[in-house]
Amino acid sequence: MSKEEFRNEKLYQTTMHLARKMLEEGIISEEEYRQIDTIFLEKYKPVFGTLFSDLPLTSEA
């Protein structure tokens, strides 16, 4: 993975983590979340992004 791909992956994962939090808190709707995901998938073109998009990145223990 190149530095650029790694950077894009981090940016996508961070963005989607924030979007998931907004969804959980009722700030945005499911439809808005899907729109955000579509926009940032196109923008960042993450290598692994869609594989992990529904998994939390940290343990909530």
Image (tube, rainbow, N blue to C red):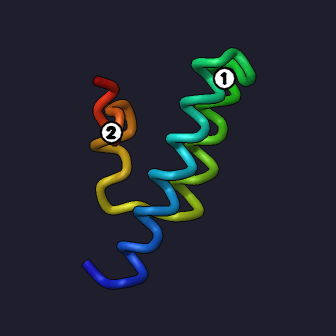
- Expressed as whole percent of the image width and height from the top left, the position of residue 44 reads 52, 64
- Expressed as whole percent of the image width and height from the top left, the position of residue 16 reads 53, 43
Is 58 drawn above or below residue 33 in the view shown?
A: below
Question: Quick one: SS at disc 2?
Answer: loop
Q: What count of labels does the image hold?
A: 2
Residue 32 is left or right of residue 55, and the answer is right
- What number is the disc on residue 58? 2
Give whichever of discs 1 and 2 has the lower sequence position. 1
- Please name which of the two marks, 1 or 2, marks the residue nearer to the observer: 2
Residue occupying image coordinates x 72% and y 24%: 28
Is 36 drawn above or below residue 24 in the view shown?
A: below
Residue ID for mark 1: 31
Residue occupying image coordinates x 25% and y 78%: 1
Question: Quick one: SS at disc 1?
Answer: helix
Residue placed most toward the observer, 35 or 21:
21
Residue occupying image coordinates x 69% and y 19%: 29
Is 26 drawn above or below residue 38 in the view shown?
A: above
Q: Quadrant of the C terminus?
A: top left
Number of other residues with Cα within 10 Å of mark 2, as a class: few under 14, some 14 to 19, many 20 or more: few
The quadrant holding residue 60 is top left
Look at label 2 and name its amino acid: Thr
Q: CA distance from mark 1 to mark 2?
A: 25 Å
Look at label 1 and name its amino acid: Glu
Q: Residue furthest front?
A: 61
